[in-house]
Image: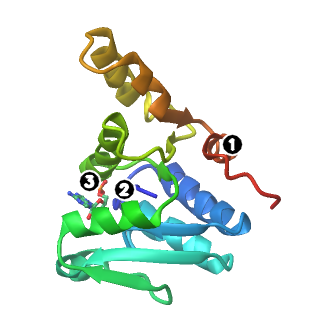
Amino acid sequence: MYCGSSESTNPAYHDLASRFGAAVARRGLRLVYGGGSIGLMGRCAEAARAAGGQVLGVMPRFLEAREIPLANVPHRMVDTMHERKLVMFQESDAFVVLPGGIGTLEEAVEVASWRRLDLHSKPIVFLAEDDFWTPFFALIQHTIDLKLTPASFAQAVTPASSIEECFDAIGARVSA
Ligand code: AMP
């Protein structure tokens, strides 16, 4: 899961992150995330942990002071941002992207670009209950319209406007 580290964004995004974390746990799935206790990341992981779910945090050592590893969840400590992304990629069966800033975009676009190169076939779902991801999908479509990205790539990145729709998209629906 990729999402923002902001404490001061729209509270509805923090709420979505909490509900998503709890839903992951209820479905018996493991949440792999960046390891921090701040922003949407922290809300999501804390909710998953509180609901009895498995959580794995992947934290670069140099970010420990800034992002503050969440207590009582296992962490894989790594040295670089590249290593963090590689471990998160290897440990994840699907990627869910919640609202976030430049860091979230960077991580999500990397796994999407790896789909474009056929390096994996894991689902990538962009979840928001409002129009947060609309400009992102418009930009992807813009690159498709200009024949910079193949039209088939549109199937590699899926928008979801609810948590249920998100789990349907990744095919991970199990009885709650
Ligand atoms: P943001 O969306 O900017 O709040 O960032 C969300 C998370 O992405 C934070 O945990 C950042 O540390 C992380 N992040 C930012 N850039 C990178 C990167 N290049 N590689 C891995 N993680 C990153």
User: Considering only vertical position in the picture, is 65 above or below 171?
Assistant: below
**Residue at numbered disc 1:** 168
Tell me the element at label 3.
helix
The reply to whether the residue tagged 1 has its Cβ within 8 angstroms of ligand 1 is no
Residue 3 position within the rendered picture, expressed as x and y whole percent measured from the top left: 40, 55
Q: Is residue 38 left or right of residue 49?
A: left
Q: Does the residue labelled 3 lie within 8 Å of ligand 1?
A: yes
Give the tally of numbered discs: 3
Q: What residue type is labelled 1?
A: Asp
Mark 1: few/some/many CA within 10 Å (<14, 14-19, 20+): few
In this rendered view, identify the residue nearer to me: 53 or 40: 53
Helix, strand or loop status at disc 2: loop
Q: Which of marks 3 and 2 is in front?
A: 3
Residue ID for mark 3: 103
Q: Where in the figure is residue 61, as x and y percent of width and height?
A: 21, 82
Q: In this view, does 155 lie above or below 126?
A: above
Q: Residue at x 57, y 57 (%)?
A: 15
Check if mark 3's residue and mark 2's residue have beta carbons within 8 Å: yes
> Residue at image x 51%, y 53%?
94
